[in-house]
Amino acid sequence: MKRNILSAIFVIAIVFASTAQQGRKGHHKSQLTPDQKVTLGIKKMTLALGLSSSQQQKLRPILLEAASKRMKMMQARKENRGQRKEMSSDAIFAKMNNALDQKIAFQNKIKNILKNEQFEKWQKISSKMHKKRGAKMMTNQKRKQGHSKMKGKKRAHKGNKTKA
């Protein structure tokens, strides 16, 4: 079940994988509307999974809803960035439970539209994207920790080495 939930997360990642790559290069990602992101995502899914036109039409509202929810959550996080509050264990549980319920519902909607082979392929692609994203997040966290440790300390440069 945990695996299925994670794969639902990665459907969204598949949809926005190319726009994320563009975002690093020229920050084009933030300039796209949710509708534009969904259009690009559906085209990528069509290429990867061989979607029919009826499947594309059925996926559009589902992906558009997910994209708009994601944009709202990102805006809320930006607004509350400096106001971190400690959450109780019940609040954390409720938040995680709600997120998992949404992921399960999303996955079930996708499963109802895709054929069995398409759904299996989608799950494989989603899990690969999840692994990539997880590894990337870990390297970013390590880099941030390294920068915070280096504050106040002088960094050694090649030109500063002295011969003994």
Image (tube, rainbow, N blue to C red):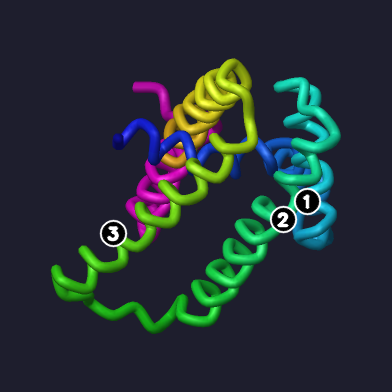
Question: Between 131 and 55, which is closer to the camera in this rendering?
Answer: 55
Query: Which residue is tagged 1?
Result: 37
Is residue 139 inside the magenta stretch?
yes
Point out the residue furthest to the left here: 89
Amino acid type of the residue tagged 3 in the rendering: Asn
**In front: label 3 or label 1:** 3
Q: Is residue 133 left or right of residue 164?
A: right
Q: Position of residue 163 (x, y in %)?
A: 41, 22
Pointer 3 with pointer 2, Cβ within 8 A:
no
Which mark sits nearer the N-terminus, 3 or 1? 1
- Identify residue for label 2: 61
Residue that badge 3 annotates? 97
> Which residue is at the front of the view, 69 or 163?
69
Residue at figure coordinates x 55%, y 45% from the top left: 109
Residue type at tag 2: Pro
Label 3 secondary element: helix
Residue 61: say if magenta.
no
The percent position of residue 149, horizontal first and vertical second, equals 33, 52
Q: CA distance from mark 3 to mark 1?
A: 27 Å
Q: Earlier in the sequence, mark 1 or mark 2?
A: 1
Position of 35 relative to 12 (above/below): below
Disc 1 element:
helix
Q: Nearer the viewer, mark 1 or mark 2?
A: 2
Quadrant (top left, top right, bottom left, bottom right) of the N terminus: top left
First of labels 3, 2 by sequence position: 2
Q: Which mark is residue 131?
A: none
At x 83%, y 47%, the residue is 39
Looking at the rendered structure, the secondary structure element under dot 2 is helix
Residues drawn in magenta = 138-164
Question: Residues under labels 3 and 2: Cα distance?
Answer: 24 Å
